DNA sequence: TGAGAAAATACTTTATCAGAAATCATCGAA
DNA sequence: TTCGATGATTTCTGATAAAGTATTTTCTCA
């Protein structure tokens, strides 16, 4: 028996409990399940998720840094009151930081990576299903961000990106077309080594994504009280 | 006796232990006490600070988000390997986000706030001591950031600002003069409601601060191994 | 018989749990 | 309206369980 292949009831969760808890709380906030300003009961949430209070507490620290909840010392955590402009601002910042990364990527990207990105763009047009498109989209941007070759930018982009409510590809009829067109333009700028143009395009791309995020949340009843 | 003024041996720390621990770890990292790549022993650190492991653990989560340490699941936390370019990038991002805030502030700042900022600038020139100047400087930027009136920007700026190693006013002979000049220019742009100019000036101001931060860390032996 | 590789074991460290201590907000009384 | 007691939570501690790492031992092959 070379491995513990036929293992017993090993749990299959995402590595650690606090990441799982954070993901679940994010879902509840953006789905409108947890309303803005509501106090988050650590104990109740822990019971509900079948874990102890500690991972929940750690998840709340993470979400505080992301701006999803507001943590007041010795008072507890509250769902952050996010306005439409807060969402737009989030994507605006996401945009300028991504723009910086694109600016660098325009200089650094190897010919091989550029080719790989062209392939990605091609695959996005060959009518894959929505979920697959979202994955390809993620991969496209990831390539740019890694090419920027800056630990600092990468770490910030990781935080900024996690907050995003996924599901653009399902929610917006015209988003796939718009995204494809944007990606082609960005890729052209990167291929031409036009750092400034790549930066501007990426900034606009994400500002637009911000508007879509607002519309998506609107439709999901995020601001209905 | 209106309050527990003449209290017993109440501890006087900064509200909660994890914030204290985070501050202490930051200090050790930027002073070169904890070297890049070094593994952080949670238990040893907890013993040393006279607290339990949990606040230390929570501090490490915070510092992970700030990019000061790198947390690998079930492996522990390691001091982030920060290059000179990482520091510059940090301030670059700090700059673009602060720039966004300044852009908004140029539109929003009330005449009263502008007057208050003029007073702050005046006081910075009336030869206060270095520590006081650093405080006034902080207040100056805080005014701008609050005037931007965006929870999202404010929260990000809070995180970005904490990482900064303080002590510019002590460390650089010419920084007070440079900072005063920059502030005057920024203030002029804000008073003239020139959003774009305010943004550019703030971006430059912080990019310069980044160079100074690199020089400061260099002098403190941060990169000597 | 000695050297190298694989596997099992022991050890160190992290992640989690349940409960105790401290703190703040609320409510009632003067 | 102000002060003090009560109750509900958060925050922290010590202990336990789960991983990962390193070491040692054993086995195979030259």
Image: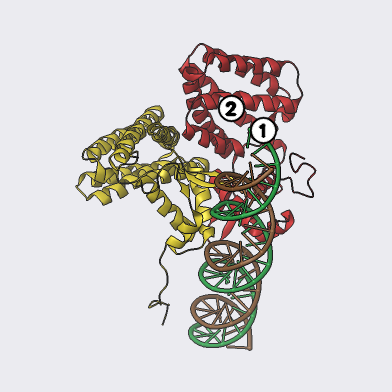
Chain colours: A yellow, B red, C brown, D green
Classify the position of the N terminus of chain A by image quarter: bottom left
SS under mark 2: helix
What secondary structure is found at the residue carrying circle 1? helix
Q: In the figure, is residue B190 to the left or right of D14?
A: left
Q: Nearer the viewer, residue A166 or B9?
A: B9
Which numbered disc flags the more N-terminal residue, 2 or 1? 2
- Nearer the observer, A126 or B121: B121
Horizontal side of A124 relative to A63 (left or right) equals left
Indicate the position of residue A136 as horizontal and vertical percent values.
30, 48
Mark nearer the viewer, 2 or 1 = 2
Which residue is depicted at the point 48% across and 63% down?
A51
**Which residue carries the number 1 mark?**
B215
Outermost left residue: A127
Whole-percent x and y of residue A193? 38, 32
Residue name at image x 34 percent, y 44 percent: A140
Q: Residues within 10 Å of mark 1 (few under 14, many from 20)?
A: some
Instruction: Write down the residue under mark 2.
Output: B142
Residue B38 appears in view: no
- Residue C8: % across, % down: 53, 83
Q: Position of residue B127 (x, y in %)?
A: 76, 18
């Amino acid at each position: 028996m070379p491995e513990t292949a036929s293992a017993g009831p090993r749990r299959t969760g995402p590595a650690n409990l606090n990441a799982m808890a954070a993901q679940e709380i994010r879902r509840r906030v953006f789905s409108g399940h947890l309303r803005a300003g509501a106090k988050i009961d650590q104990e109740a949430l822990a019971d509900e998720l079948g874990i102890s209070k500690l991972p929940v507490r750690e998840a709340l620290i993470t979400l505080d840094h992301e701006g999803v909840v507001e943590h007041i010392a010795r008072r507890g955590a509250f769902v952050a009151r996010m306005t439409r402009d807060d969402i737009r601002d989030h994507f605006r910042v996401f945009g300028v930081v991504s723009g910086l990364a694109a600016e660098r990527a325009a200089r650094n990207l190897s010919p091989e990576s550029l080719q790989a990105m062209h392939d990605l763009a091609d695959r996005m047009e060959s009518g894959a299903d929505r979920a697959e498109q979202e994955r390809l989209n993620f991969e496209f941007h990831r390539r740019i961000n890694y090419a920027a070759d800056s630990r600092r930018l990468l770490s910030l982009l990781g935080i900024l990106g996690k907050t995003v409510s996924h599901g653009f590809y399902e929610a917006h009829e015209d988003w796939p077309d718009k995204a494809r067109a944007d990606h082609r333009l960005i890729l052209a700028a990167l291929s031409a080594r036009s750092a400034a143009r790549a930066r501007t395009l990426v900034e606009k791309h994400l500002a637009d994504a911000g508007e879509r995020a607002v519309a998506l949340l609107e439709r999901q009843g995020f601001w209905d009280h």
